[in-house]
Image (tube, grey):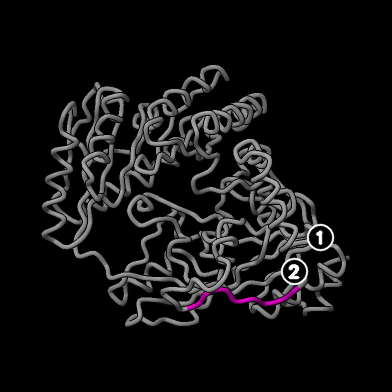
């Protein structure tokens, strides 16, 4: 057995025996996407990762690298068997330099632990892709994860200055480092960021930090329809207001949202816009006034919390949305697409229309400032016909994104569920260039096969 061979080569403490079912799925398990593997390994050092890659490459064994398993695209699901390589034991903060505004962390460190370590030194790591207690930095880098504050601060990749990588057939490579500036070489770091484990295995990363904003303020406004809500979003953007987050909820997601902070939500509310402002105390006050002015026209109600606890309550409400939407029917198929900002209203409306054609309730919410929708089809998890209809609706959604001049993913990655649409989005020549990069890094095609491209 492969597990026995790996145990002899690497030591029994590296291989996992017994029930490994939790290592064969990610969040797409609700869509019945499950993989299979011949062995699961849990290295704790970069040397061990390199030894595993060398072992596998010499024997033509596929490797699926895994972080926290919080992905929504099937990227961590081992579809070709072989080895699942989980980085959960690589969870050390290797260096913390608060006076240099940086830290080096291993791939298995959770997002929330990075943010907490930064906060302890009065610093800020802005990316907040969700599931912070479970998601790993390595996985966030692999998908170039986003989140609400990506509007102002960018995706995870914007905060990575260096990577330690293991590349086939088992070499350790360093690109970038604790640097603020480097233009000497091809940007291999940016190639690996977002490559979803298909080019290299990230074992550690240097992360850039900034001083913690002195203050933050949330503002929520609700509107009678999608058009007036989207118009408010366009007003915020067109006015050049530097908000940290600019979110939206359509009618279906607003109705499903957990208990609200409004004393009574207006019965005509069909759309919500959530903004957050941060910066110095004076900047926050001034910018909040401008945001309120931009959101007020056509709003049925506007809520601006007056305390930090109330601001936190707004974000708990927003963060509870995914679970609340799922609870409506027990399951969902949710995809993240991106469209040009002037097409946001079209994409919101068409999501519902695609659902209607599939015979399924549909809704969307997401990062309005980035044109990033989480378009969702609600299903009964026990009904295979509904799941199949939702999967087909998702394919229609990807085609919609391409037709509107957008992208099939804004932060969740391509993984398994979107692979057939990348060539359609890119065009033949650009897709060939992607294939050439893959061939250069992974000539045998053993790293996360069947994903991304």
Q: Position of residue 335 (x, y in %)?
A: 53, 38
Residue that badge 2 annotates: 168
30, above or below 104, in the image:
above
> Left of 367 or right of it: where is 425?
right
Q: Which structural element holds mark 2?
A: loop
Q: Which residues are magenta?
A: 170-177
x%, y% of residue 193? 55, 60
Label 1, on which residue? 444
100 shown above or below 140: below
Residue located 48% across and 33% down the image: 375
Residue 355 part of the magenta-drawn span: no
- Residue 382, by quadrant, is top right
Can residue 14 be seen in this snapshot? yes
Q: Are marks 1 and 2 in contact (CB under 8 Å)?
A: yes
At 53% across and 74% down in the image, what residue appears? Answer: 184
Dot 1 crowding, Cα within 10 Å, few <14, some 14–19, many 20+: some
Q: CA distance from mark 1 to mark 2?
A: 9 Å
For the N terminus, the image quarter is bottom right
Q: Main secondary structure of the magenta part?
A: strand
Q: Is residue 236 above or below residue 62?
A: above
């Amino acid at each position: 057995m492969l597990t026995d061979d790996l145990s002899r080569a690497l030591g029994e403490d590296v291989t996992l025996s017994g029930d490994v079912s939790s290592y064969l799925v990610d969040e797409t398990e609700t869509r019945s996407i499950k993989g299979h593997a011949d062995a699961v390994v849990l290295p704790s050092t970069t040397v061990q990762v390199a030894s595993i890659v060398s072992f596998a490459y010499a024997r033509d064994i596929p490797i699926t690298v895994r972080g926290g398993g919080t992905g929504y695209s099937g990227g961590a699901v081992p579809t070709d068997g072989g080895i699942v390589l989980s980085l959960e034991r690589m969870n050390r903060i290797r260096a913390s330099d608060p006076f240099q505004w940086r830290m080096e962390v291993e791939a298995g460190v959770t997002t929330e632990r990075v943010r907490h370590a930064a906060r302890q030194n009065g610093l800020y790591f802005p990316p907040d892709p969700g599931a912070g207690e479970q998601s790993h930095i390595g996985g966030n880098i692999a998908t170039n994860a986003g989140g609400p504050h990506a509007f102002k601060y960018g995706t995870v990749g914007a905060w990575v200055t260096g990577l330690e990588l293991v590349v086939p057939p088992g070499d350790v490579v360093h690109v970038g480092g604790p640097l603020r500036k480097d233009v000497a070489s091809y940007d291999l770091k940016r190639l690996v960021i977002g490559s979803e484990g298909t080019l290299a295995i990230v074992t550690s990363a240097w992360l850039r930090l900034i001083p913690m904003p002195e203050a933050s303020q949330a503002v929520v406004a609700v509107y009678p329809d999608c058009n007036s809500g989207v118009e408010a979003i366009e007003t915020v953007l067109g006015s050049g207001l530097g908000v940290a987050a600019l979110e939206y909820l359509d009618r279906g997601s607003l109705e499903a949202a957990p208990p609200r902070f409004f004393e009574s939500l207006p019965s005509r509310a069909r759309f919500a816009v959530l903004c957050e402002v941060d910066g110095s105390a004076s900047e926050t006050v001034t910018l909040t006034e401008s945001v309120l002015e931009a959101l007020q026209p056509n709003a049925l109600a506007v809520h601006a919390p007056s305390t930090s606890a109330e601001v936190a309550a707004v974000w708990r409400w927003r963060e509870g949305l995914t679970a609340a939407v799922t609870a409506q029917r027990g399951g969902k198929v949710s995809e993240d697409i991106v469209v040009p900002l002037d097409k946001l209203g079209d994409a919101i409306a068409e999501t519902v229309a695609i659902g209607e054609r599939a015979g399924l309730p549909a809704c969307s919410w997401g990062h309005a400032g980035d044109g990033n929708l989480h378009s969702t089809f609600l299903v009964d998890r026990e009904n295979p016909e509904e799941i199949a209809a939702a999967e087909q609706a998702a394919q229609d959604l990807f085609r919609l994104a391409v037709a509107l001049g957008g992208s099939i993913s804004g932060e969740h990655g391509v993984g398994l569920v979107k692979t057939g649409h990348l060539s359609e989005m890119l065009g033949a020549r650009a897709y060939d260039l992607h294939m050439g990069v893959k061939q250069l890094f992974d000539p045998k095609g053993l790293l996360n096969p069947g994903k991304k491209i």
